[in-house]
Image: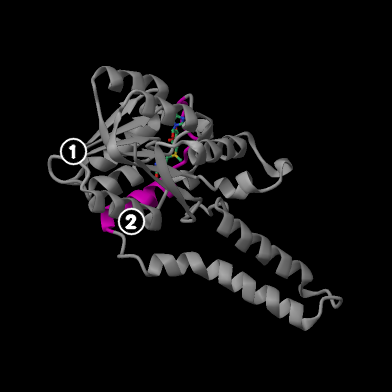
Amino acid sequence: MTKLKPVTPLSIIASNLEKALISIESKDLIDAETKELLKTTKELATRLEPYLIENATPEENILRNLAKVTLEHDWRGSDSSQMNSLEPEMLSGHVEGMFLRQIVALSNCKNILEIGLFSGYSALAMAQALPKEGRLVACEIDAHAAKFARSQFAKSDHGSKIEVIVGDASETLKTLRQDKHVFDLVFLDADKVGYKGYFEFLLENNMVKQGGIFLVDNTLLQGEPYLNEEHRSQGGEAIRLFNEYLSREPRIEQVLIPIRDGVTLARLIA
Ligand SMILES: C[S@@+](CC[C@H](N)C(=O)[O-])C[C@H]1O[C@@H](n2cnc3c(N)ncnc32)[C@H](O)[C@@H]1O
Protein backbone atom coordinates (compact mmCIF):
# COMPACT_ATOMS: atom_id res chain seq x y z
CA MET A 1 0.00 0.00 0.00
CA THR A 2 1.11 3.60 -0.72
CA LYS A 3 3.10 5.24 2.07
CA LEU A 4 1.28 8.46 2.80
CA LYS A 5 3.06 11.79 3.16
CA PRO A 6 2.49 13.71 6.41
CA VAL A 7 -0.22 16.24 5.51
CA THR A 8 -1.53 17.44 8.86
CA PRO A 9 0.17 19.63 11.49
CA LEU A 10 0.36 16.65 13.87
CA SER A 11 1.81 14.18 11.36
CA ILE A 12 4.34 16.81 10.24
CA ILE A 13 5.37 17.41 13.88
CA ALA A 14 5.69 13.64 14.40
CA SER A 15 7.73 13.15 11.22
CA ASN A 16 10.04 16.11 12.00
CA LEU A 17 10.64 14.82 15.53
CA GLU A 18 11.47 11.37 14.19
CA LYS A 19 14.00 12.88 11.78
CA ALA A 20 15.47 15.08 14.52
CA LEU A 21 15.87 12.08 16.84
CA ILE A 22 17.63 10.03 14.16
CA SER A 23 19.96 12.94 13.46
CA ILE A 24 20.92 13.55 17.12
CA GLU A 25 21.12 9.84 18.09
CA SER A 26 24.83 9.59 17.33
CA LYS A 27 25.75 13.09 18.51
CA ASP A 28 27.38 13.26 21.94
CA LEU A 29 26.85 17.00 22.35
CA ILE A 30 23.15 16.46 23.10
CA ASP A 31 22.70 15.42 26.74
CA ALA A 32 20.67 12.35 27.70
CA GLU A 33 17.95 14.43 29.37
CA THR A 34 17.28 16.45 26.20
CA LYS A 35 17.27 13.27 24.10
CA GLU A 36 14.75 11.69 26.47
CA LEU A 37 12.57 14.80 26.32
CA LEU A 38 12.55 14.70 22.53
CA LYS A 39 11.79 10.97 22.56
CA THR A 40 8.76 11.43 24.83
CA THR A 41 7.53 14.35 22.71
CA LYS A 42 7.86 12.21 19.59
CA GLU A 43 5.84 9.42 21.26
CA LEU A 44 3.15 11.94 22.25
CA ALA A 45 2.87 13.03 18.63
CA THR A 46 3.13 9.67 16.85
CA ARG A 47 0.79 7.76 19.14
CA LEU A 48 -2.06 10.28 19.19
CA GLU A 49 -3.54 9.51 15.75
CA PRO A 50 -3.58 5.69 16.27
CA TYR A 51 -5.18 6.30 19.68
CA LEU A 52 -7.94 8.42 18.13
CA ILE A 53 -8.62 5.65 15.59
CA GLU A 54 -8.65 3.02 18.35
CA ASN A 55 -11.21 5.00 20.33
CA ALA A 56 -13.66 5.74 17.54
CA THR A 57 -16.42 3.26 16.71
CA PRO A 58 -14.78 0.79 14.31
CA GLU A 59 -14.83 1.69 10.63
CA GLU A 60 -17.45 -0.19 8.64
CA ASN A 61 -16.22 -2.63 6.00
CA ILE A 62 -17.59 -0.60 3.10
CA LEU A 63 -15.66 2.51 4.19
CA ARG A 64 -12.54 0.52 5.07
CA ASN A 65 -12.61 -0.95 1.59
CA LEU A 66 -13.22 2.45 -0.01
CA ALA A 67 -10.15 3.80 1.81
CA LYS A 68 -8.08 0.76 0.77
CA VAL A 69 -8.91 1.01 -2.94
CA THR A 70 -8.36 4.79 -2.85
CA LEU A 71 -4.89 4.32 -1.40
CA GLU A 72 -4.06 1.57 -3.90
CA HIS A 73 -5.31 3.49 -6.92
CA ASP A 74 -2.82 5.30 -9.12
CA TRP A 75 -4.38 8.75 -9.20
CA ARG A 76 -1.68 10.02 -11.57
CA GLY A 77 -2.21 7.23 -14.05
CA SER A 78 -5.24 8.62 -15.89
CA ASP A 79 -5.48 11.03 -18.78
CA SER A 80 -8.19 13.05 -17.05
CA SER A 81 -7.32 16.77 -17.09
CA GLN A 82 -7.42 17.26 -13.31
CA MET A 83 -5.69 14.00 -12.37
CA ASN A 84 -2.22 15.39 -11.73
CA SER A 85 -3.44 17.31 -8.72
CA LEU A 86 -5.15 14.32 -7.11
CA GLU A 87 -3.39 12.23 -4.48
CA PRO A 88 -4.44 9.51 -2.01
CA GLU A 89 -3.69 11.82 0.95
CA MET A 90 -6.86 13.75 0.00
CA LEU A 91 -8.98 11.03 1.58
CA SER A 92 -10.47 12.24 4.87
CA GLY A 93 -10.50 8.83 6.55
CA HIS A 94 -12.02 7.15 9.56
CA VAL A 95 -11.78 9.68 12.42
CA GLU A 96 -12.87 12.67 10.35
CA GLY A 97 -15.51 10.57 8.57
CA MET A 98 -16.92 9.49 11.93
CA PHE A 99 -16.89 13.10 13.12
CA LEU A 100 -18.85 14.24 10.03
CA ARG A 101 -21.28 11.39 10.48
CA GLN A 102 -21.93 12.37 14.12
CA ILE A 103 -22.67 15.97 13.13
CA VAL A 104 -25.11 14.80 10.42
CA ALA A 105 -26.86 12.49 12.89
CA LEU A 106 -27.00 15.08 15.71
CA SER A 107 -28.35 17.83 13.47
CA ASN A 108 -31.10 15.68 11.92
CA CYS A 109 -30.24 17.23 8.59
CA LYS A 110 -31.77 15.95 5.36
CA ASN A 111 -30.08 17.96 2.61
CA ILE A 112 -26.31 18.03 2.39
CA LEU A 113 -24.06 19.75 -0.10
CA GLU A 114 -20.48 18.50 -0.44
CA ILE A 115 -18.01 20.53 -2.46
CA GLY A 116 -15.02 18.27 -3.26
CA LEU A 117 -15.96 14.58 -3.49
CA PHE A 118 -12.68 12.87 -4.53
CA SER A 119 -13.13 9.08 -4.09
CA GLY A 120 -16.31 9.49 -2.04
CA TYR A 121 -15.24 8.65 1.53
CA SER A 122 -16.71 11.68 3.34
CA ALA A 123 -19.86 11.65 1.18
CA LEU A 124 -20.60 8.03 2.03
CA ALA A 125 -19.75 8.51 5.72
CA MET A 126 -22.30 11.37 5.89
CA ALA A 127 -24.91 9.59 3.74
CA GLN A 128 -24.88 6.71 6.24
CA ALA A 129 -26.29 9.06 8.90
CA LEU A 130 -28.97 10.57 6.64
CA PRO A 131 -32.54 9.32 6.92
CA LYS A 132 -33.95 7.27 4.03
CA GLU A 133 -35.38 10.33 2.30
CA GLY A 134 -32.16 12.36 2.89
CA ARG A 135 -30.09 13.62 -0.04
CA LEU A 136 -26.45 14.57 -0.51
CA VAL A 137 -25.39 16.53 -3.59
CA ALA A 138 -21.67 16.20 -4.26
CA CYS A 139 -19.71 18.52 -6.57
CA GLU A 140 -16.57 17.18 -8.21
CA ILE A 141 -14.56 18.73 -11.02
CA ASP A 142 -12.65 15.55 -11.92
CA ALA A 143 -14.67 13.12 -14.03
CA HIS A 144 -12.40 10.18 -13.20
CA ALA A 145 -12.72 10.75 -9.42
CA ALA A 146 -16.51 11.08 -9.83
CA LYS A 147 -16.68 7.77 -11.72
CA PHE A 148 -14.52 6.09 -9.07
CA ALA A 149 -16.78 7.40 -6.26
CA ARG A 150 -19.98 6.39 -8.05
CA SER A 151 -18.67 2.84 -8.42
CA GLN A 152 -18.09 2.74 -4.65
CA PHE A 153 -21.56 4.17 -3.85
CA ALA A 154 -23.13 1.42 -5.97
CA LYS A 155 -21.85 -1.10 -3.39
CA SER A 156 -23.66 0.61 -0.48
CA ASP A 157 -27.33 0.75 0.57
CA HIS A 158 -26.78 4.45 1.26
CA GLY A 159 -25.23 5.21 -2.13
CA SER A 160 -28.59 6.03 -3.74
CA LYS A 161 -28.90 9.08 -1.45
CA ILE A 162 -25.89 10.65 -3.18
CA GLU A 163 -26.10 12.65 -6.40
CA VAL A 164 -22.74 13.44 -8.00
CA ILE A 165 -22.49 16.52 -10.22
CA VAL A 166 -19.35 16.75 -12.34
CA GLY A 167 -18.03 20.23 -13.08
CA ASP A 168 -16.43 23.27 -11.52
CA ALA A 169 -18.24 23.89 -8.24
CA SER A 170 -18.62 27.60 -8.97
CA GLU A 171 -20.73 26.66 -12.03
CA THR A 172 -22.59 23.85 -10.24
CA LEU A 173 -23.55 26.28 -7.46
CA LYS A 174 -25.23 28.56 -10.01
CA THR A 175 -27.30 25.64 -11.33
CA LEU A 176 -28.24 24.61 -7.78
CA ARG A 177 -29.33 28.20 -7.08
CA GLN A 178 -31.46 28.21 -10.23
CA ASP A 179 -33.09 25.00 -9.03
CA LYS A 180 -33.75 26.70 -5.65
CA HIS A 181 -31.76 24.24 -3.56
CA VAL A 182 -31.50 25.05 0.15
CA PHE A 183 -29.15 22.92 2.26
CA ASP A 184 -29.14 22.02 5.96
CA LEU A 185 -25.44 21.24 5.96
CA VAL A 186 -22.50 22.07 3.68
CA PHE A 187 -19.16 20.24 3.71
CA LEU A 188 -16.51 22.32 1.99
CA ASP A 189 -13.47 20.29 0.89
CA ALA A 190 -12.39 21.37 -2.62
CA ASP A 191 -9.79 23.86 -3.93
CA LYS A 192 -8.66 26.02 -1.03
CA VAL A 193 -8.52 29.24 -3.07
CA GLY A 194 -12.19 28.76 -3.88
CA TYR A 195 -13.44 28.40 -0.28
CA LYS A 196 -14.29 32.06 0.36
CA GLY A 197 -16.11 32.40 -2.97
CA TYR A 198 -18.20 29.25 -2.42
CA PHE A 199 -19.04 30.30 1.13
CA GLU A 200 -20.07 33.83 0.16
CA PHE A 201 -22.12 32.57 -2.78
CA LEU A 202 -24.06 30.20 -0.51
CA LEU A 203 -24.71 32.98 2.04
CA GLU A 204 -25.62 35.67 -0.47
CA ASN A 205 -28.06 33.40 -2.30
CA ASN A 206 -29.70 32.02 0.85
CA MET A 207 -28.75 28.49 -0.11
CA VAL A 208 -28.28 27.42 3.51
CA LYS A 209 -31.20 27.41 5.93
CA GLN A 210 -31.21 29.49 9.12
CA GLY A 211 -29.30 27.51 11.75
CA GLY A 212 -27.69 25.49 8.96
CA ILE A 213 -24.25 23.99 9.44
CA PHE A 214 -20.98 24.44 7.59
CA LEU A 215 -18.12 22.00 7.97
CA VAL A 216 -14.94 23.23 6.34
CA ASP A 217 -11.96 20.93 5.89
CA ASN A 218 -8.24 21.75 6.00
CA THR A 219 -8.66 25.01 7.90
CA LEU A 220 -5.28 24.35 9.55
CA LEU A 221 -3.68 23.48 6.18
CA GLN A 222 -0.54 21.82 7.57
CA GLY A 223 -0.09 24.75 9.98
CA GLU A 224 0.58 27.19 7.15
CA PRO A 225 -2.03 29.82 8.14
CA TYR A 226 -0.35 30.40 11.52
CA LEU A 227 3.28 29.93 10.45
CA ASN A 228 5.39 32.81 9.15
CA GLU A 229 4.67 33.98 5.62
CA GLU A 230 7.73 32.23 4.10
CA HIS A 231 6.18 28.85 5.06
CA ARG A 232 2.87 29.66 3.37
CA SER A 233 1.78 28.30 -0.01
CA GLN A 234 -0.98 29.90 -2.11
CA GLY A 235 -3.43 27.45 -0.50
CA GLY A 236 -2.13 28.31 2.99
CA GLU A 237 -2.63 32.02 2.35
CA ALA A 238 -6.12 31.35 0.96
CA ILE A 239 -7.04 29.44 4.12
CA ARG A 240 -5.56 32.16 6.35
CA LEU A 241 -7.71 34.74 4.58
CA PHE A 242 -10.76 32.44 4.68
CA ASN A 243 -10.37 31.89 8.44
CA GLU A 244 -10.00 35.65 8.94
CA TYR A 245 -13.10 36.31 6.82
CA LEU A 246 -15.12 33.77 8.80
CA SER A 247 -14.11 35.18 12.17
CA ARG A 248 -15.36 38.61 11.00
CA GLU A 249 -18.61 37.37 9.42
CA PRO A 250 -21.36 38.36 11.89
CA ARG A 251 -23.87 35.86 10.47
CA ILE A 252 -21.62 32.95 11.40
CA GLU A 253 -20.63 31.37 14.71
CA GLN A 254 -17.68 28.98 14.39
CA VAL A 255 -14.96 26.93 16.04
CA LEU A 256 -11.84 25.43 14.43
CA ILE A 257 -11.39 21.85 15.63
CA PRO A 258 -7.89 20.33 15.29
CA ILE A 259 -9.09 17.01 13.87
CA ARG A 260 -6.74 15.84 11.13
CA ASP A 261 -5.84 18.96 9.06
CA GLY A 262 -8.40 21.12 10.91
CA VAL A 263 -12.17 21.14 10.48
CA THR A 264 -14.17 24.31 11.12
CA LEU A 265 -17.64 23.73 12.47
CA ALA A 266 -19.83 26.76 11.78
CA ARG A 267 -23.48 27.70 12.05
CA LEU A 268 -25.58 30.30 10.26
CA ILE A 269 -27.03 32.31 13.12
CA ALA A 270 -28.58 35.31 11.35
C1 LIG B 1 -9.53 16.97 -0.65
S1 LIG B 1 -10.35 16.27 -1.99
C2 LIG B 1 -11.90 15.83 -1.29
C3 LIG B 1 -11.81 14.70 -0.33
C4 LIG B 1 -13.13 14.08 0.07
N1 LIG B 1 -14.08 15.07 0.54
C5 LIG B 1 -12.89 13.04 1.14
O1 LIG B 1 -13.13 13.35 2.29
O2 LIG B 1 -12.43 11.95 0.87
C6 LIG B 1 -10.72 17.66 -2.97
C7 LIG B 1 -11.53 17.35 -4.22
O3 LIG B 1 -12.04 18.59 -4.73
C8 LIG B 1 -12.03 18.54 -6.13
N2 LIG B 1 -12.03 19.91 -6.66
C9 LIG B 1 -11.00 20.77 -6.75
N3 LIG B 1 -11.39 21.92 -7.29
C10 LIG B 1 -12.72 21.80 -7.55
C11 LIG B 1 -13.69 22.66 -8.12
N4 LIG B 1 -13.37 23.90 -8.53
N5 LIG B 1 -14.95 22.20 -8.25
C12 LIG B 1 -15.29 20.96 -7.82
N6 LIG B 1 -14.40 20.10 -7.29
C13 LIG B 1 -13.14 20.51 -7.14
C14 LIG B 1 -10.75 17.77 -6.47
O4 LIG B 1 -10.81 17.23 -7.77
C15 LIG B 1 -10.72 16.72 -5.35
O5 LIG B 1 -11.31 15.52 -5.77
* Residue 178, quarter of the rendered image: top left
Q: Position of residue 129 (x, y in %)?
A: 22, 50
Name the quadrant where ligand 1 sits: top left
Residue at left 50%, top 68%? 48
Give the left or right position of residue 9, taking residue 51 as reference: right
| Whether residue 248 is situated above or below residue 22 in the rendered picture | above
* Residue 21, quarter of the rendered image: bottom right
| Whether residue 26 is situated above or below residue 164 in the rendered picture | below
Tell which residue pokes out farthest to the right in this image. Answer: 29
- Mark 2 packing: few (<14 Cα in 10 Å), some, or many (20+)? many
Residue 130: say if magenta. Answer: no
Residue at left 62%, top 34%? 234
Q: Secondary structure at mark 2?
A: helix
Q: Position of residue 79 (x, y in %)?
A: 47, 26
Visible residue check, residue 118: no
Span shown in magenta: 60-80
Visible residue check, residue 258: yes
Asked whether disc 2 touches disc 1, contact meaning CB atoms under 8 Å apart, the reply is no
Query: What label does residue 31 carry, if any?
Result: none
Q: Secondary structure at mark 1?
A: helix
Query: What label does residue 98 carry, if any?
Result: 2
